[in-house]
Image: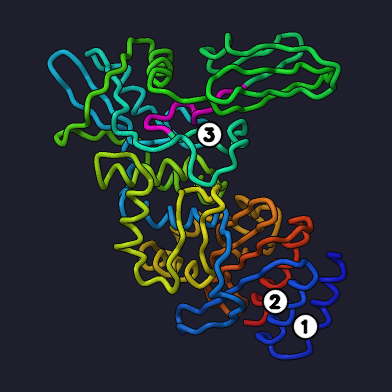
Amino acid sequence: MGRIVLCLILCFLFACSPQVRIKKILHTSEDTFQDHIGLLVYDPDKRETIVDYNSNRYFTPASNTKIFTLLSSLHLIGDSIPAFRFEEKPDSLIIWGTGDPSFLNSKVFHNNRTYDFLKNHELPIYFSSSNFHQDHFGPGWAWDDYNYSYSPERSSFPVYGNLLSLTDSLGDGVKVFPSLFQDSVIIKKTESKMKKANRRVGDNSISFNLGADSAIFNREVPFHVSADLIARLLQDTLRKAVTTVNNRLPTHSKTFYSIPSDSLYKVMMQESDNFVAEQLLQMCAGILSDSLASEIAIEHVKKNFLFDLPDEPQWVDGSGLSRYNLFTPRSIVRLWEKIMLMVPQERLFQLLAVGGKAGTIKNSYRSDPPYIYGKTGTLSNNHCLSGFLLTKKGKVLIFSFMNNNYTTPTNLVRKNMEAVLFEIHERF
């Protein structure tokens, strides 16, 4: 089927004007894939639309939702990430999380500022999660994703990215990190060759099927978060007592900062890290109020920064894991235009996935120099790509390309998108 679509594309290449040709290709693709396609390509310098195909229709954006989280963060967070809030008393240090996902997280750049401050502080440490006011999972998330590393639980003070790792090295047995969870793992020997780790819903009991496969096994599993567990993890890594309390966050509390904000934005936009995205949006809410609740940030950003979008976004989370999110291609293009006005192009492009070079499009959209900088979004039966397209004539175009409800392999849809975008790169 993919070959048929590509042949049809080639037949259209020289038949008519580029705009008409591309629309015909998209229409043919919809018939072939039996899906829904939306595409808007826009020239921000001339303020002209290059291609418009169903750009006023709503689509499930998947991780294109992270573009909304990026704009929110750029408006609200500043140059450095707030690591935690604190109040120093004569006999104690009380801390409240801000949602900073970088603490001891191997997936993102992290310095030792937070660790050193807490480790070296002379007063006893008390941790309060009283400012955390949302469920660990977002609305519309798939309930059975709780066991997968792309869906860690949201929390006020993440540690190790809220993930534990299981490693079955030959002859060494199953090792768990952090070691605090070692006794939570139940080893089962099965006739199946596959090794498999499953955490029980609602607690941290993990069943590990050893299997007959002799290969080394490494698996990350989200752990179930509670205030007591956060305190125990902090105590375990700091090697000092950390006690839970339920103190309310005072208005006069101070903020301790950790890493440059761009370090998190890059992981969110290039690698499409869901956990980082959720925590950033939660962090935005904590800056606006005394509560870590993503809906506070969403409503504020919609009211103050997105009121002039062509279509009202149906926006419920930071990562795009929810299928409740619905955006139109023309609204996403307008969103990118807003971001362009806030961030110099050189800095912005360093944060994004780059065709053939970096992130989620490292193995596609290949060209030297690169011509695609953007953000992908993928859920089952849905694939999107939005961002910036550099043409051979030196133009920087903004685009949003959305595909929903196909049943063919995503790779075929991606190849079709690549052919269309490369045509625009060549012709404009």
* Nearest to the observer: residue 35 or residue 348: 35
Percent x, y for residue 104?
45, 27
Q: What stretch is highlighted in magenta?
A: 155-165
| Residue 175: quarter of image | top right
Report the residue marked by disc 3. Answer: 152
Percent x, y for residue 60?
58, 59
Mark 2 residue type: Glu
Q: Is residue 155 left or right of residue 423?
A: left
| Residue 299: quarter of image | bottom left
The 10 Å Cα crowd at callout 2, few under 14, some 14 to 19, many 20 or more, is some
Position of the C terminus by quadrant: bottom right
Nearer-N-terminus badge (3/2): 3
- Dot 2: element: helix
Q: In this view, does 218 lie above or below 188?
A: below
Report the residue marked by disc 1. Answer: 13
Answer yes or no: do the residues labelled 1 and 2 have beta carbons within 8 Å? yes
Q: In this view, does 413 lie above or below 167?
A: below
x 52%, y 77%: residue: 42
Mark 1 residue type: Leu
Mark 1 to mark 3 CA distance (whole Å)? 45 Å
Percent x, y for residue 164?
56, 23
x 27%, y 16%: residue: 125
* Nearest to the observer: residue 46 or residue 236: 236
Mark 1 to mark 2 CA distance (whole Å)? 8 Å
- Dot 1: element: loop
User: Which marked residue is nearer to the observer: mark 1 or mark 3?
Assistant: 3
Report the residue marked by disc 2. Answer: 423
x 64%, y 51%: residue: 379
x 76%, y 9%: residue: 171
Mark 3 residue type: Pro
Nearer-N-terminus badge (1/2): 1
The 10 Å Cα crowd at callout 3, few under 14, some 14 to 19, many 20 or more, is many
